């Protein structure tokens, strides 16, 4: 599974219109719970290749604009969660590229 995933990461980003940071945010939020956005990079993807706090923050903003993520609250106290559209996007990607 891991070698297939590594081999298809670039293909996923090229064919889906998502950046790797977008993908990391979507799979992190897939469980559907409201969570604070700050720990996504700091606690989970700090050492991930092609990931930085600014890329994750930008990804969250872009995913929110595209309807894949919703923000609840304001400022630093805001929490985010994946939407049904975001879950559908993850499911399509998983079926097409990863669960062969």
Image (cartoon, rainbow, N blue to C red):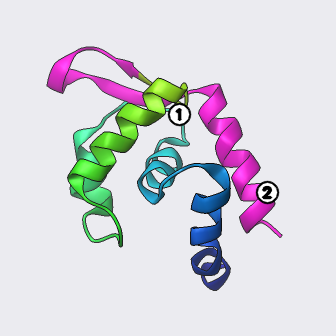
Disc 1 versus disc 2: nearer the observer: 2
Q: Residue furthest top?
A: 73
Q: Which residue is mark 2?
A: 95
- In which image quadrant can residue 30 be found? top right
Does residue 35 appear to the left or right of 8 in the view shown?
left
Which residue occupies 55% across, 31% down? 68
Q: Earlier in the sequence, mark 1 or mark 2?
A: 1
Q: Secondary structure at mark 1?
A: loop
Q: Is residue 59 left or right of residue 6?
A: left
Position above or below: 50 against 73 = below
| Residue 28 higher or lower than 64, as above or below | below
Residue under circle 1?
Answer: 32
Mark 2, other Cα within 10 Å: few <14 / some 14–19 / many ≥20:
few
Residue 34 seen anywhere in this rendered image of the structure: no
Q: On residue 77, which mark appears?
A: none
Magenta residue check for 59? no
Q: CA distance from mark 1 to mark 2?
A: 19 Å
Q: Main secondary structure of the magenta part?
A: helix
Quadrant where the N terminus lies?
Answer: bottom right
Q: Which residues are magenta?
A: 71-100
Q: Residue at x 26, y 22 (%)?
A: 78
Is residue 73 part of the magenta span, yes or no? yes
């Amino acid at each position: 599974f891991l070698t297939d995933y590594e081999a298809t990461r670039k293909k996923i980003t090229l064919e889906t219109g998502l950046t790797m940071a977008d993908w990391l945010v979507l799979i992190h939020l897939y469980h559907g719970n409201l969570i604070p956005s700050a720990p996504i990079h700091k606690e989970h993807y700090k050492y991930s290749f092609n990931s930085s706090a600014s890329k994750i923050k930008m990804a969250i903003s872009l995913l929110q604009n595209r309807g894949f993520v919703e923000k609840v609250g304001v400022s630093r106290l805001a929490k985010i969660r994946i939407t049904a559209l975001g879950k559908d996007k993850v499911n399509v990607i998983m079926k097409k590229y990863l669960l062969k």
